[in-house]
Image: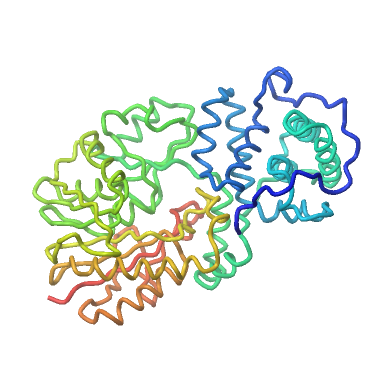
Amino acid sequence: MAPNRRTDQKPLGRPDKTDQDSRPPEGSARTTTERAVTARGLAASVLQRVTDEGAYASRALDAELSRSQLEPRDAALATEIVYGSLRVLPDLDRTLSARLTRDPARMDGFVRATLRTAAYQLAHLGRLPTHAIVDESVSQVRARRGPKLAGFVNAILRRLAEARPAKPELASAMVLPDWVRAALLASLGAERLGHLLAHGAQSPALCLRSEGAPRDQVLADLRAALPGADIEPTALSPLGILVRRVGSPRALPGYAEGAFSVQEEGAQLIALALGAQPGERIADVCAGHGGKTTLLARAVTSSGSVDALDKDERKLRAIAPELERTGVTASIELHAVDLSVGTGGLSDTFDRVLVDAPCSGLGTAHRRPELLLRLNADDPARLGLLQRRILQRAAGLVRPGGLLAYAVCSPMREEGYEVAQAFAAEHPHFELVRTAAHPALPPPDADGVLQIGPWLTPAGAGPDAYQLIFWRRSP
């Protein structure tokens, strides 16, 4: 789904007269006229930036919240509205389109964002009074776009309010564009897709990774310091800790001292599954900011080394400060290299090579639901070709008898499975490894692909969706 571009500011449909007696929403400390920014207005502004301008939701939201100085309760509401709306956007658009007489893509951007966020609240946030949702949404549009468009919004939302469920409930599943759903169904099957969509409807917890101290100690310290927060160990990674309602992770007790880092559970499992051992030489290809690099460096200890490769030198600069903060002493070398072009002079001297390749990121869509707005149907295949080029050159870094791992945070066949098939056909001296990669993980599927995802835990609250494939180079 391509972002909608603002092309026309004319109102759509048949607007009723503007409600001149709109009451201020309940739960707000001050009325709209007493402050320029409200949770709902801020959420609509952020959603407009994401859908119309291609902004990243997290960055746009953080920037708006920093400027607004909303109280924590209102900031939490704005966050819930933004991410909740993005996770079910196709359903919201279908609901609105049924009540419009013209193409919604021609609507004023802020008006459309306001309608979308209000429709989400009416459908899924039962604790919020109907009149508060409608009245404040109308007031925001009146203040920013004038009475004519406010009247239009009022008319549409009154109709939606009449059809509001008696007991609105949070969405039970993430809603995907039709082509994404069809492609994921072909890639995962119905059961795994069901787990992924149910997982995607939830607001994800922040995942931490314990560093030098045992996880139980880090858990105990966090619980003692934050008695009102939800703090639990992850189900699969032996290093992971899930936390909610804790604010910025950098402000948590123990962060400055290097007790933990921030890393999603699936990403932890990818690095752990590589099986790095003390004294080994490891290559972390497409290392990014080095989340896996630092974990691998701890595994090889001071007797080993890790080479981190990425085409973006700015990302690589984040690795050294993290090593210092967490007290990791392994030797690290950084290489600003584009593996789709060459290896920067590196040769086949590495015991293990991890390729965490650039991909569509669909396995992380519940964290970054705006991805669904940016992807086109041909993107997975296009990215698969890029992954093939990177994997081809990364294979040249593996020593005889060494291990090559290829991972993507996407469950699409065009990215994981089909890339692996092409690689195997072109590299007969690499043998597919079919055994379990880590005690916390099951063995790969029959096709040799290890599918990591929320279906691996009984509660369906497991890691993001990844594909992971291993090969051993012939001695």
Along the line of sight, the residue nearer the viewer: 386 or 38: 386
Who is closer to the viewer here, 437 or 48?
A: 48
Q: Which quadrant of the rendered structure holds the C terminus?
A: bottom left
Residue 198: give x, y in percent of width and height: 58, 55
Residue at image position (20%, 56%) is 276
For image coordinates 61% across by 48% down, the residue present is 51
143 vs 343, left or right, is: right
Decide if residue 142 is on the left or right side of residue 424: right
In the shown orientation, is residue 339 left or right of residue 244?
left
Q: List x then y, in percent, for residue 58.
A: 50, 40
Q: How is the image coloured?
A: rainbow
What x and y, as percent, mark residue 210?
30, 40
Which image quadrant is residue 125 in? top right
Residue 399 found in image quarter: bottom left
Quadrant where the image shows the N terminus: bottom right
Q: Quadrant of residue 373?
A: bottom right
Residue farthest right in this picture:
17
What's the residue at 15%, 61% (across, down)?
346
Q: Tell me how many marks there are.
A: 0
Q: Is residue 279 left or right of residue 356?
A: left
Location of residue 45 with respect to 277 vertically, above or below: above
Q: Is residue 20 above or below residue 299?
A: above
Coordinates of residue 118 in the picture (x, y in percent) = 73, 40
